[in-house]
Image: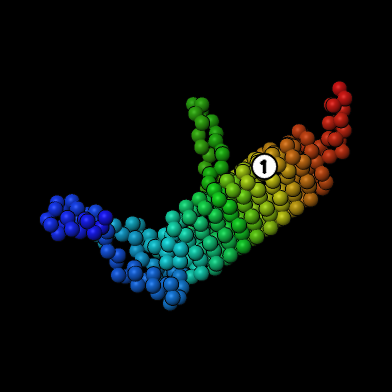
């Protein structure tokens, strides 16, 4: 096709043919890729932009808000971002101003790292993840489609009866060695940061409301819903589709059966189930009695 187009152009065909011809690659980009392939360019210099990152432009020298192309993966990042040379940003991922990516971070295609977000070393982020207003610890795994740091669900009614949004100005803080499943949402805080403790594991499709504080080594199974301002101790386990109402506290070493709902504080460790959640022995007797009636 390109050969035929060149023949037409040589014979004096319309100038409109010219824009169909493949554009020659820019020498500096070829040199950059070649250098990167042989290892002479290791990555983006930490906290700065240099010759190892090609500036995105429209072909006429115009830059797009100081975003650069990362040679390690082909993603884009703002020149004020602090990127470790070993971090990999895949094509289609975007890292916004003043974000910080630690050593060996892997950012999947389609992911957006928002302004001033910090990601700790060796964290793996999947495709189409959204991180904003948050910090993520080291050695975490965040699966595809997860959203962390968006506004919580908070509203008030004014004197005229209109529904107004409450300010959501704080952050979400994810500890070290945390795993977050696909399409899970963790809201930023309004009166305190939303916190996920170290070594906690969160399944797919989990909702964690604003101001929630989850302790260390907790397990939240699929479709769990945690309302705002909830406080968990350590080693709390919630079965699938369990729910916790707002402003409830659950002490450490509590296990909640699937499809249960916590409506008031749980102050003693143990197993609970039902709606409302009660100690597991009581819940089982309730189920048997209901079956006999």
Q: Nearer the viewer, residue 169 or 92?
A: 92
The N terminus lies in which quarter of the figure? bottom left
Q: Residue extending furthest bottom? A: 40
x then y, percent, for residue 251: 77, 48
Above/below status of 7 relative to 242: below
| Label 1: few (<14), some (14–19) or many (≥20) C-alpha neighbours in 10 Å | many
Q: Is residue 192 visible?
A: no
Counting labels gives: 1
The C terminus lies in which quarter of the figure? top right
Residue at x 18% of width, y 51% of height: 16
Residue at x 53% of width, y 39% of height: 166
Q: Is residue 160 visible?
A: yes
Q: Please indicate whether residue 287 sits to the left or right of residue 155 in the image.
A: right
Q: Nearer the viewer, residue 174 or 258?
A: 258
Res 30 quadrant in image: bottom left
x then y, percent, for residue 54: 36, 66
**What kind of element bears circle 1?**
loop
Above/below status of 241 relative to 216: above
Residue at x 55% of width, y 67% of height: 104
x then y, percent, for residue 140: 61, 59
Q: Please indicate whether residue 235 sits to the left or right of residue 284 in the image.
A: left
Q: Residue extending furthest left? A: 12
Q: How is the image coloured?
A: rainbow
Q: Please indicate whether residue 214 sits to the left or right of residue 56 in the image.
A: right
Res 31 quadrant in image: bottom left
Residue at x 33% of width, y 57% of height: 64
x then y, percent, for residue 151: 53, 44
- Name the residue that disc number 1 marks: 224
């Amino acid at each position: 096709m390109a050969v035929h187009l060149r023949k037409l152009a040589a014979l004096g065909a319309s100038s409109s043919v010219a824009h169909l011809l493949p554009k020659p690659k820019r020498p500096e980009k070829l040199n950059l890729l070649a250098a990167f392939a042989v290892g002479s360019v290791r990555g983006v210099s930490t906290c700065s932009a240099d010759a190892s990152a090609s500036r995105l432009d429209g072909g006429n020298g115009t830059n797009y808000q100081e975003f650069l192309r990362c040679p390690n993966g082909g993603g884009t990042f703002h020149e004020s971002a602090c990127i470790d040379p070993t971090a990999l940003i895949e094509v289609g991922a975007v890292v916004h101003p003043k974000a910080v990516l630690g050593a060996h971070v892997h950012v999947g295609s389609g992911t957006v790292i928002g302004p001033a977000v910090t990601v700790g070393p060796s964290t793996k982020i999947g495709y189409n993840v959204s991180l904003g207003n948050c910090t993520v610890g080291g050695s975490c795994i965040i699966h595809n489609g997860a959203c962390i740091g968006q506004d919580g669900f908070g509203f008030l009614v004014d004197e005229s009866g209109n529904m107004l949004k409450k300010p959501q100005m704080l952050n979400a803080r994810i500890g070290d060695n945390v795993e977050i499943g696909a399409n899970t949402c963790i809201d930023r805080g309004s009166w305190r940061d939303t916190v996920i403790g170290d070594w906690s594991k969160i399944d797919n499709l989990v909702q964690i409301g604003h101001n929630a504080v989850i302790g260390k080594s907790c397990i939240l199974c699929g479709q769990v819903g945690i309302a705002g301002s909830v406080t968990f101790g350590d080693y709390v386990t919630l079965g699938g589709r369990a729910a916790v109402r707002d402003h409830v506290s659950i002490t450490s070493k509590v296990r909640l059966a699937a499809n249960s709902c916590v409506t008031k504080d749980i102050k003693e460790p143990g197993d609970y189930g039902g709606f409302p959640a009660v100690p597991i022995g009581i819940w089982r007797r309730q189920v048997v009695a209901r079956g006999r009636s």
